[in-house]
Structure formats: C-alpha cells, structure tokens
Image: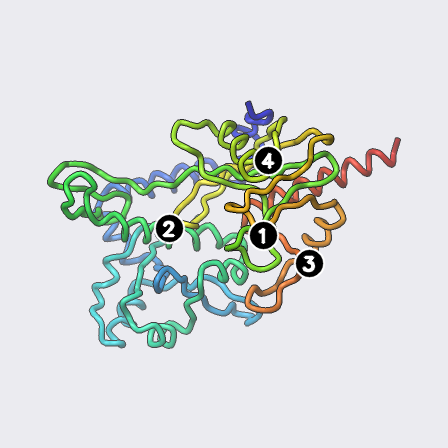
Amino acid sequence: MLQSFKHLFSCNLVLSRSISGYVSRMRYLMRLKEDDEACREALKSGKVLLYHKLSPLLRKTSCGSGYKLASLKTSDLEQIFEKIGKDKHIVNESFLLGCTDKNEPQFSLEVGDLDRSALEHECRGMFVDLRKAFFMIPGPESPLAAKGPALLRWHQTNCFCSATGQPTVRNQSGGFRVCHSSGITYYPKMAPVVIVLVSDGSRCLLACQAMFPPGMYSALSGFCDMGESVEEALHREVAEEVGLEVENLQYSGSQHWPFPQSSFMFACHAAVNPDKTQVNIDKAELEDARWFTYEEITEALQNPPPDPRRELPLFWVPPSYAIANQLIREWANQQQLSRELHRLK
C-alpha cells in the first residue's frame, strides 16, 4: 500500500477556499450541467474560451510582458462571428467548463472550421499549440487551458454510439452524450496513468522518450492495465521500462493531463535498494534513462527553458504546470532537508 495514502484526505488536497462559497458554486455548476435551459441562460452572460483545432486563444497581458487565456463575453463573440460573416449562433455549441469564484460561467468552443487569421485579428490574440501555451500562460490558468481541449476532443470522438452506430446527442452543457436508439448515456472519461519518481536515496531516475523535446527528462509513467491497482501498475511500469524493483511507495498528488487524449495522472515517489540500481532500458519505450544527482536536479529547476520555441538546454525537466515537476521538486526539497539535518549532527 502507499505509505502516505492518508494524504488524500489531508494536506495534499486541502484547498484554501470558503466552504460555504465553494458548496454554493459547486451546486450552481451542477445545476448548469443538468438543466439545459439554465445552461443556455448562463451562456448568455458567460465567458468563452476559443480553441482552433484544440489550440487555445491567448492574449497579451495588460502589461504586455506575458500571455493569458483569452476569455470573451458571449455577446462580444457573437458580434465577432457576424463581423467575419458567420452565424452568431455558433456560440451555442460551446461546452461548459466551470465557473469562477464569482460564479461566472466559463465555456469552451472549437472554431477550427473558421478562418484562423480573421479570428485572431478580431479577437486581438493568437492561437497557440497547447504544449507551447503551457510555457506562456500563468500557472493557475493551466488546468482550465487543459480541460477545454480534453472535453472538445472527447465530443469529437464520441459522436456515435459504440453499440448501435447511431449518432449520439449532447446535452447543452456537454456533460454527457446520449444514444436515443439504445438509451446508452456516455460520459467524458480519463485514462488512469501512474507517474513515479524513483530514488536510490541520493539520486533520482529520470527518462526521456522519443516524443519529448530535445534534452527533457521526466519521471517514469504508464497507463494502468485493466484490473490493476495503482500500486501494481507502478511496480510493473518501472520493471518494464528500466528493469528495477521498487519499494516504499509514497503518494504525492494527482493531475488531469490532456495528452495523448485525456489522462488522470496519479503521482508517487518510490525507492529502490541502493545496491540494485543498474538500469536496463526498454528501448521500445524509452530513448534514455539515467540517474541524476541533487546538484544536477537543482540546476535544472533553477534554470527552466523560458521558451520551447528557442534553443533548449542539454538537460531540463518538465515545466511547473506538470505534476512531474512537483515530484522532482519534492525530491530535491527532501534531499536539501536531509543534507541540512546531516550537517547539524
């Protein structure tokens, strides 16, 4: 079992919020999910995030030094659609994403069939590939930026019933699709994935895949097989990919991840016997995997690549929005604490 599984119900998931305000907001959101008419009314006064072929629309911040997600009022968006010669009612195809702390409904809309340059001009922004956008927007906006394309992609790939082949019909919020022929209701799903940072006590193990940007190393990860527990999947993935047996698993946190489709990342730390650290890489899965020292990790954390479109360093770790970065930072902090305690002895 995971040694700190109790953290699921303690410090790791504690959110700073007003309980009464949170409950009120969640119940309002549930009403919008289930009541089509209430959702249509909310859309009229809500904000919409645009995606062009799943790339989010970004705008420069007011100070001009960075970018943020572009959030447009429905009324303004209707005028933009009319201005470029399109039906303003396209906005009714939006999907509900959530709502702000002030109960302002937020929606996502795919506009990949519309002229990209015309939209960018009228919206005073630019559509950016999601992976690159994560480097450009503030960290707190990352979950919202990821949820939009994940929900849009799910609807794009679930237009037909798997039992009958007949078209499925969405509800207004986009919270589910129904096949009226079979009566089956389909809900958006995430695939469970384990991600683990392995340590031998003084070093941590990172790996790179062929699909990674040059120089980026990350924690090991893999999909859970049908019927597996998280612990079983974690043991198996490490054994398959690097030929090591892990022990002393410790839960860290979880994260929705929009790639490759929509994944639910379950993050853990794991230890190996310091006398059994020989790595045997599965080349079908990984390009490389190796042990990194505390000094190497600290330098990588202190010098993240500012822009993935420019020249990248020889070794770097996933950016702060990724839960892999959280695992690596936790390990580095623990190493620093251990060294300080050792010096005091």
Considering only order in the chain, which callout, 3 or 1, is on the residue closer to the N terminus?
Answer: 3
**In the foreground, 64 or 342:** 342
Inter-mark Cα distance, 3 to 4:
31 Å
**Residue drawn 50% across the image and 55% down it:** 211
Q: Position of residue 245 (x, y in %)?
A: 61, 29
Q: In the structure shown, which secondary structural element does the residue marked by tag 1 occupy?
A: loop
Circle 3 residues within 10 Å: few <14, some 14–19, many ≥20: few
Mark 2 or mark 4, which is nearer the start of the sequence? 2
- Residue 14 visible in the picture: no
Residue 120 is drawn in which quadrant? bottom left
**Looking at the image, is mark 3 or mark 4 earlier in the sequence?**
4
| Secondary element at image label 2 | helix
Which mark sits nearer the N-terminus, 1 or 2? 2
- Name the residue type under label 3: Asn
User: To which quarter of the image does residue 345 belong?
Assistant: top right
Q: Which amino acid lies under the numbered mark 2 shown in the image of this protein?
A: Ala
Q: CA distance from mark 1 to mark 2?
A: 20 Å
Determine which residue is flagged by label 1.
Answer: 318
Provide the residue designation for mark 4: 243
- Mark 2 or mark 3: which comes first in sequence? 2
Looking at the picture, which amino acid does disc 1 mark? Pro
What number is the disc on residue 63?
none
